[in-house]
Amino acid sequence: MNTSGKVIKCKAAVLWGLKQPYSIEEVEVAPPKAHEVRIKILATSICRTDNNASTGAMPAKFPVIGGHEATGIVESIGEGVTTVKPGDKVIPLAVPQCGFCSACISPKSNFCEKIDITGKGVLSDGTSRFTCKGKPVYHFMNTSTFSEYTVVEEGAVVKIDASAPPEKVCLMGCAFSTGYGAAINTGKVTRGSTCAIFGLGGVGLSIIIGCKVAGASRIIGIDINPSKFERAKAVGATECINPKDYTKPINEVLKEITGDSVEFTFEATGNLDTMVDALASCHMNYGTSVVVGDPPASKMLTYDPLLVFTGRTWKGCIFGGWKTRNDLPKLVADYMAKKFDLDHLITHVLPFNKIRDGFDMLNKGERRRNVSSLYKSANLPELLLFAKYFSICVMHFIFLKSKVSQLH
Ligand code: APR
Ligand code: ZN
Ligand code: ZN
């Protein structure tokens, strides 16, 4: 059935307000206006930020359709769209690349000013393309992928290899790209170097994958939860340590075991103390430390300026520093060429209508940290293929493997 130009009724996960659970609703999705693209979502994953929309830690305009890590197929395009066409396989972009703002023009930056981190929840004409029960429902992070269909601006979508598996490469919409890019682009990890990664969740594992691809010869995983070590080693950590096993500060421990040669450290826990620990742990003169974990909102930290005065470099990045429209197709191509594997980051898949279960599990894990899950929308005929593919695990809840142990 040709749906182009028509309103599409479909299922979406709507947050009606703060502290409320995602609720599966029938929504209407308007056709794309000029320079917009309507996408049929094939697979999407749950990120902590989607949960933060309901807690208030991430601003959103309610009611809102969450979700920002996904793969889909272009259903129709608005007037003037030239870079994608119906039938293209795409990744929606929470960090857009509008091509016109100062960040997009500079080769040094990826922080496009079209990013919606303030929760305005509308497209560029100031309106939403979603309605439910007669009311407007707002967009989330330019993407709203918890819907069978969504509408995004052309700058917030990129075409990828048509043969890329949607249930894997959806992770490139946020988690994987963030960690992997932190190592490759921001840290610029060098061949033969020693790296230390603080926090071995999904982001930390993706950093390890980046360090390995960059040719680091020693990759030290650090976590207060030793059940994370096995997975970290599976993706490339050469050794793992638990700061709780030592009485000395972690920077001294690392200095001792490496003979003072940790060149690159990465913070992937989101704790202020760990950010300073990671800085202190890299070489005092030529070390680089990268902040990857989200700093807690409105919190300040104090640190000894001598740490940077001696020559260390302290950096951070958004979305791994990738210019999304330029770089994601290349990342997908690298995945297809088996440069790295995403399987270790996924443990379970669940159907779209179980999304609330996914968030329940995320929150259970979050008490000790968090859990992300990957689910797929399984109620459209075209998705039967995926249903079959996942038939072994479709009845199970699926989580980032690194995080599963936290639930037990
Ligand atoms: N020292 C070492 N490891 C720690 C510490 C600490 N002080 N505190 C927590 N951790 C570990 C946890 O045990 C957990 O394994 O950090 C890991 C964090 O993993 P997740 O909670 O799964 O988080 P993840 O999704 O990987 O994201 C990491 O990046 O995007 C941000 O908001 C995200 O700040 C978070 C960070
Ligand atoms: Zn821009
Ligand atoms: Zn995310």
Image (cartoon, helix red, strand yellow):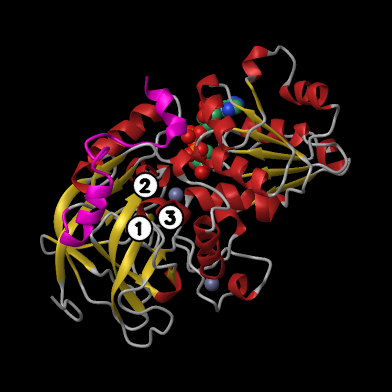
* Residue 367 among those drawn in magenta: no
Amino acid type of the residue tagged 3 in the rendering: Val
Q: Position of residue 364 (x, y in %)?
A: 34, 27
- Cα–Cα span, label 2 and label 3: 18 Å
The residue segment tinted magenta is: 379-408
Q: Secondary structure at mark 2?
A: helix
Q: Is mark 2 within 8 Å of ligand 3?
A: yes
* Residue 394 among those drawn in magenta: yes
Q: Position of residue 100 (x, y in %)?
A: 55, 79
Q: Residue at x 73, y 20 (%)?
A: 249
Q: Classify 255 as above or below 82.
A: above
Q: Earlier in the sequence, mark 2 or mark 3?
A: 2
Residue 269, quarter of the rendered image: top right
Which residue is disc 2 drawn over? 50
Residue 162, quarter of the rendered image: bottom left
Q: Classify 361 as above or below 57.
A: above
Badge 1: residue crowd in 10 Å (few <14, some 14–19, many ≥20): many
Are the residues tagged 1 and 2 within 8 Å (C-beta)? yes
Q: Earlier in the sequence, mark 1 or mark 2?
A: 2
Q: Residue at x 86, y 26 (%)?
A: 259
The answer to whether residue 204 is left or right of residue 49 is right
Q: Position of residue 135 (x, y in %)?
A: 16, 63
Which residue is disc 1 drawn over? 140
Residue 277: mark in rendering: none
